[in-house]
Amino acid sequence: VVDSGEDTWIAPPNSKSWVLDFDHVTNGNYCLKVNLYAAQILVHMQNDCWTQASTADADSDGVLDADDMCPYAPVVANDANGDGCEDVDDTDGDGMDDDWENFYNTDPYVDDGAGDLDGDGVSNLDEFTNGTNPASSDTDEDFVNDGVDVCPLVWGDMANGCLTPINLPPICDIYFSLEMNGMVISGSAAIPAIPPMIPGGIGPQEIQVPAGTYYIIAVCTDPEGDMVTATINGVTIGPAATATVGAVINITENVEATVDVTVTWTDGVNTLTGAISITVAGGTNFVPDADGDGYTPGFTAAIGVMSLLGAAIAMRRRRL
């Protein structure tokens, strides 16, 4: 990596030289740009380009390190493909290495690539290529024959020999904005990836806000691209690639009651529910910021929760 920088030249003398040290760079074409200023005036600009072609050969086998797949292991006898690695012996030319054939008791002196030592319907050569065991009809021991096993190297619980995929649950980010600003879904989420409630464990999330009217907005997506349905205080949006649903929250000062905003989200497999408690900053039920950062990540206190769909702005216009 070449970083930009500057140096100062005070004349006389009438010439000056600089030596630039470069970290190792891969082969390719590179350019260096130099600007010469007198005071703040640009008086000269020059570009120099060159082709970087490494000649390093750490193992001295005639294959340059840039092309050597085994840069520290010199070729002793055979390297038919020129990759810098010693070719393994294959005496009978059947595509299977002699060491592999000796290990699995196939014949290294007879072309038996088309044979099927274990009778699983997969040829010896295909077993070699696939990395399966030519002496076992069920390499991963999941009771599915290698010949029909879609995942022959990994134990599986399905009929095709693969593991039942784990479906990841959707993720919901919670935003809020003053009603006067419209439904704003930008910037950092007030509660990113709201956690689901767990009895005896995770409870409602909390956020402090001054008195006012707010949009509480849930934006839910699925990490695997599944369609998502989201519900907030009884109003549902989806299924959709991105399910956005919101509620209007009217918050007044000196409230003592606490009203939870409930968010439920599902991808048809996983269904989760989280809760948000709204608290008025400075109100009678406000709990001071425990960590002293001036912000409590979540909502406790509220009056009047009105659910709505994403068209909350239109509702506001009707009131005008």
Image (cartoon, rainbow, N blue to C red):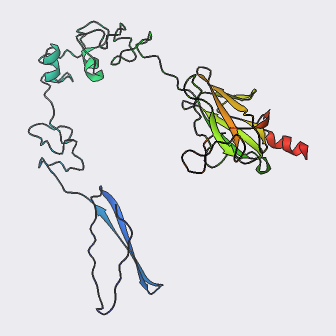
Q: Residue at x 40, y 16 (%)?
A: 150
* Relative to 30, residue 71 above or below: above
The quadrant of the image that shows the N terminus is: bottom left
User: Percent from the top left, x then y, of residue 66?
Assistant: 24, 50
Residue lying furthest bottom: 12
* Relative to 102, residue 172 above or below: below
Give whichever of 223, 318 is nearer the camera. Answer: 318
Residue lying furthest left: 76
Left or right of 245? Residue 26 is left
Give whichever of 131, 5 is nearer the camera. Answer: 5
Give whichever of 287, 251 is nearer the camera. Answer: 287
Left or right of 17? Residue 215 is right
User: Percent from the top left, x then y, of residue 137?
Assistant: 29, 8
Q: Where on the picture, by quarter, is residue 250?
A: top right
Left or right of 109? Residue 139 is right
Q: Number of numbered discs present? A: 0
* Relative to 275, residue 182 above or below: below
User: Percent from the top left, x then y, of residue 265?
Assistant: 64, 27
User: Percent from the top left, x then y, of residue 161?
Assistant: 40, 13
Q: Where on the picture, by quarter, is residue 253?
A: top right
Q: Residue at x 48, y 20 (%)?
A: 165
Q: Residue at x 65, y 48 (%)?
A: 186
* Relative to 220, residue 49 above or below: below
Give whichever of 69, 303 is nearer the camera. Answer: 303
